[in-house]
Amino acid sequence: MDLNAVVGIGLVTMVGIAAATDVGHSKIPNVLTITGFVFALMVRGLIGSEALIDGLQGAAIGLVLFVPFFAIGGLGGGDVKLLTATGAFLGWERFLVAILATAFIGAAMAVFAAVRQRALLDTLLRMRDLVVGLAQRVVLSKKVTELPTLDKPGGVRNPYGVAICAGAIIGLLY
């Protein structure tokens, strides 16, 4: 069997299960993301050292780019782990395509959910407060008593695993 096909099947299986559990339980299980990550690197290692390095680079991009979003409450830990494992499956180049697709799909889902819940203005104001608070803390080195986050009571929640799943499949087909 073609090992690249095994990588693709593993990725689609992982992100499909993650999307379903995120919708059903608002959680992406650690066992799924960690197993997916290890599986991706094992199969890439069997393909060759270049494939393994490509998978490690994709995973590193996922970790470096998305941990800050977790820190501000914009993503859950399961989302970050799923994105990191997705990077391991796709490698850095295809993963960049997946990230862009995920961002657009996730943004569309967020706007749709905010409009549906009649919370678009409140959501936009929270985003403004977040950007201003981060700018004050990082750019101006101003002491901020509480770092603003997107994770507030009454906030619009989305199963971002669905956007990650769609973006990953787009990246795979790229």
Image (tube, rainbow, N blue to C red):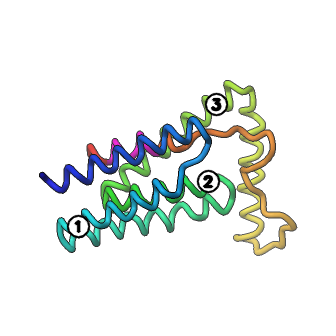
Tell me residue 42's x, y (percent).
Answer: 28, 66
Give the magenta part as a residue range. Answer: 164-171
Question: Could you tell me which secondary element the residue under label 1 belongs to?
Answer: helix
The amino acid on which the numbered mark 1 sits, given as a three-letter code, is: Ala
Residue annotated with mark 2: 76
Say which residue appears at 44% left-offset and 42% top-offset: 17
- The extreme right residue here reads 145
Say which residue appears at 41% left-offset and 41% top-offset: 16
Say which residue appears at 40% left-offset and 48% top-offset: 14
Question: Could you tell me which secondary element the residue under label 2 belongs to?
Answer: loop
User: In this picture, is 143 found above or below 8?
Assistant: below
Earlier residue among tags 3 and 1: 1
Residue neighbourhood size for the residue with mark 3, other residues' Cα within 10 Å, grouped as few (<14), some (14–19), many (≥20):
some
Tell me residue 47's x, y (percent).
Answer: 18, 65
**Residues at discs 2 and 3 in contact (Cβ within 8 Å):** no
Gap between marks 3 and 1, in whole Å? Answer: 38 Å
Q: Is residue 110 magenta?
A: no
Front position in the image: 71 or 12? 12
Residue neighbourhood size for the residue with mark 2, other residues' Cα within 10 Å, grouped as few (<14), some (14–19), many (≥20):
many
The amino acid on which the numbered mark 2 sits, given as a three-letter code, is: Gly
The amino acid on which the numbered mark 3 sits, given as a three-letter code, is: Ala
Which is the main secondary structure of the residues drawn in magenta? helix
Q: Is residue 10 left or right of residue 30?
A: left
Earlier residue among tags 2 and 3: 2
Q: Is residue 79 left or right of residue 70?
A: left
Residue 147 quadrant = bottom right
Gap between marks 2 and 3, in whole Å? Answer: 17 Å
Residue annotated with mark 3: 113
Tell me residue 100's x, y (percent).
Answer: 43, 48
Residue annotated with mark 1: 51
Say which residue appears at 77% left-offset and 66% top-offset: 136
